[in-house]
Image (cartoon, rainbow, N blue to C red):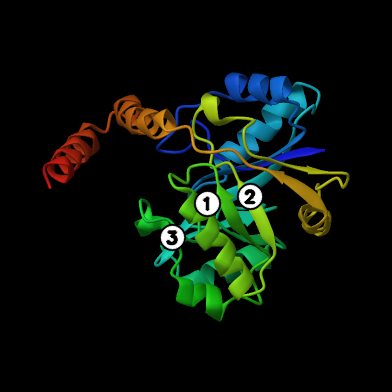
Amino acid sequence: MKLVCHVHTKFSHDSILPFWLLYSCCLYHGITHITITEHNNIDGAIAFKKYCEKKGNKVYVILGEEIMTTHGEIIGLFLNNNIKAGLSPKETIFEIKKQGGIVYIPHPYDEKRYKTVLDECYIQEFKDSIDCIEVHNGRNIDIKYDRKQNEIADKYNLRKVIGGDIHTWIEIGKDYIESDINPETPTKFIKAIEQSNFICSPVVPIAHKFTVIDRLLSFIQRGDFNGLYRTIVARLKKNKL
């Protein structure tokens, strides 16, 4: 079994990855299971699951969502319904557990994306409710981030997982989990990551550049030209600083 966690598609605001390309890359790299975790929606996961089922279910899709809380992002896996953004970490964890899902903490340390990192005080407070935490994120720009993420997992005795944080096709297949256990239920998912090999690769630097372009194209596709303008102005101001 080859599992890839933390994947975005065209249903996220910062990706335009089409289903056909994601599916083709999964087959090429021998990926058998994938967690689709769009930003603040479960729609992409549901749609890609239906797409794969029509193709014969050669890639099994675990429904997920990367939810922006009031203090950083939390991923829920094995969800049935959308969980709205803007809830507190406590409320978000409660909503995930209410659905029988898995609480998964993405990129617990990242100096570049600090606004999306869940504050460590909440990791400490809710450690007994957290099912797993990333100790490698495919978009870590520095190996130091991996070390820090591992330190946080060890500090609170949390179960480790790795995530690709895939937004583009060039990132597919470089970070994955190998296990003999089929992770198609929450219980089996936990057993799979506990008895597995983590295959990790360094970030593909150009992927971050593609994401900026994808985000701008997404504004155009939605007809959100005000959002496009604000984003361009914000980036220009940031580059001047």
Give whichever of discs 2 and 3 has the lower sequence position: 3
Mark 2 Cα shell of 10 Å, populated few (<14), some (14-19), many (≥20): many
Q: Could you tell me how many numbered marks the image carries? A: 3
Residue visible at 62% across and 53% down in the picture: 81
Query: Which secondary structure lies at badge 3?
Result: loop
Which of the 4 quarters of the picture holds residue 27?
top right
Which amino acid type is shown beneath numbered disc 1? Answer: Glu
Location of residue 76 in the rendering, given as x and y in whole percent from the top left corner = 61, 56
Which amino acid type is shown beneath numbered disc 2? Answer: Ile
Query: Which secondary structure lies at badge 2?
Result: strand
Q: CA distance from mark 2 to mark 3?
A: 15 Å
Which of the 4 quarters of the picture holds residue 232?
top left
Which mark is on residue 66?
Answer: 1
Mark whose residue sits in front, 2 or 3? 2
| Residue holding disc 2 | 162
Q: Is residue 227 left or right of residue 56?
A: left
Tell me whether the residue at label 2 lies in contact with that at label 3, contact meaning CB atoms closer than 8 angstroms: no
Q: CA distance from mark 1 to mark 2?
A: 15 Å
16 over 239 or under it: above or below: above
Q: Is residue 22 left or right of residue 122?
A: right
Give whichever of discs 3 and 1 has the lower sequence position: 1
Mark 1 Cα shell of 10 Å, populated few (<14), some (14-19), many (≥20): many
| Residue holding disc 3 | 117
Residue visible at 59% across and 56% down in the picture: 134
Residue visible at 49% across and 75% down in the picture: 122
